[in-house]
Image (cartoon, rainbow, N blue to C red):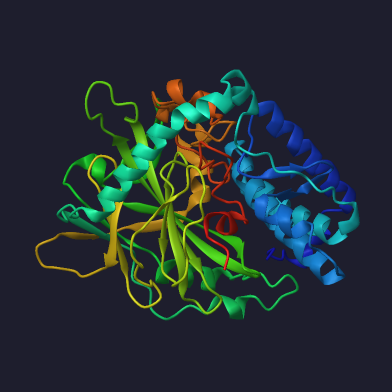
Amino acid sequence: MLLLTSAATAAAVSDGDCRGWLEDQHQRLQSLGITDPGTTAIPGYPHLRTNRWLAMLQSEVVSDGDASQWLAMAGQVALDSWRVRLRRADGDQAEQERLETCINRQVALSAFPGVPQVTVDDNYATSLRVLGLYPLTRLLAMPSINGYRREMAARFLAARPKAHHHYLPPAFPGAPPPPTELSVNYLEVPLPGKAARNALLAQYAPVITSGSDNPWDQPGRVLMETDGPRVDPGQPTAYQWIGWTRFRGHNLLQLNYQFWFTRRPAQGRMDLYAGHLDSLIWRVTLKPDGNVLFYDSIHGCGCYHKVYPVAKGLKAADLPDAPIFYPRLAANARDTRVALHLDPDTHYVVGISRFEPDRNTPTTTYRTTSADSLLALPTPRGYQSLYDERGLVPSSRRRERLLLWPLGVPSAGAMRQPGTHATAFIGRRHFDDPALPAQIFQQP
């Protein structure tokens, strides 16, 4: 929920001042080319922003209580976005405080019926599909896609790589509240406060088990330098955020963890998938009682979508270019720490198990931070986002884009900002689509 500013601070800024100041800041950010492609602006409402989740909820508002809660959530998304964009524009602490005051004030004055229903753009380029004769090229691509599916399924069944290093989340005492206790609100959305959020992210955080000692196989911290971004494997870090989804009538909390690597090394001269920077996103979807419903993972490109059911009865829907399903039920992270076994070089998840420490494998505790920190990384000349105006990391582009562009995913293989992950080459699916579980699982 929105943080409350002090009465003294709020009183120092009038409603008219807030409207004018936000508009001035909007114009300044536009002139500097500072954007946030991970969320969507609402025309005429600079104090509100939306995303796929909020766009779905907006259409379901029926009461004044629903409306107030939706406005507060859209205001929080806007506040988070404004904070990092102002930081990149060299905004000082006074501007940050004024921002919070103005967002809160304008949200309180907003009338929900006047807020336009904004369609969140998908992350496919229809123009590329038209130019690439998509109805034909999708048929030509299917043998390759089916070959990839067979390869990934075989990796799940093969022996896991020998564990060379375990990366553990920080210890966190206590137990988080179950999502059902956080859903006592008008829209029945689990909304953890700061303490509950930290406890949940700590409780379900995975262990990363690296399959080699190579520096590019160790998760690290993203740094922005004069010549562009790099990853320091000497500072293992998990970049975290929360989200929500809808499944069988329930609003479910999702916990996201992203791990970055220096590169994906080339395996031969013609490797289309190698390149600078790589990352893995691990997501935990919780049932209302706090048990895990399922996990899923993608790489930072949106590629290699895999699903790891925990609850019984979750079966894959019959989809072209469907996610790869883990062949057995995965361990429940509510009751045990889960280890992700990563393949050397590719960083594919090739196994998931209960974490069992052993004396022969070194362990390191990784640090945790908000994924929003990647939107305003310190540089010698101020702050800069890891992502460009399209939500891409330009230095991470891959050769595969030269072959896959007719399928409509711009710069296929490049790392992307959360909120912009297209996950299928055939059809259209997005990692943050609240309808995604209904798409990928068979209906009962």
In this view, the residue farthest toward the top is: 131
Q: Residue at x 90, y 52 (%)?
A: 114
* Residue 373 visible from this viewpoint: yes
Q: Which residue is drawn at 54% across and 24% down?
A: 136
Q: Which of 259 and 251 is in front in this view?
A: 251
**Number of numbered discs on residues:** 0
Residue 181 in picture, x, y percent from top left: 60, 81
Q: In which quarter of the image is residue 89?
A: top right
Q: Residue at x 59, y 23 (%)?
A: 128
Q: In this view, does 178 lie above or below 165?
A: below
Query: Which quadrant of the rendered structure holds the C terminus?
Result: bottom right
Residue 428 in picture, x, y percent from top left: 59, 41
Q: Nearer the viewer, residue 322 or 181?
A: 322
Q: Which of 429 and 110 is in front in this view?
A: 429
Residue 353 in picture, x, y percent from top left: 28, 66
In this view, the residue farthest toward the left is: 360
Q: Which of 274 and 440 is in front in this view?
A: 440
Q: Horizontally, is 278 left or right of 106 in the view?
A: left
Q: Horizontally, is 180 left or right of 145 in the view?
A: right
Residue 57 in picture, x, y percent from top left: 73, 60
Q: Residue at x 41, y 30 (%)?
A: 396
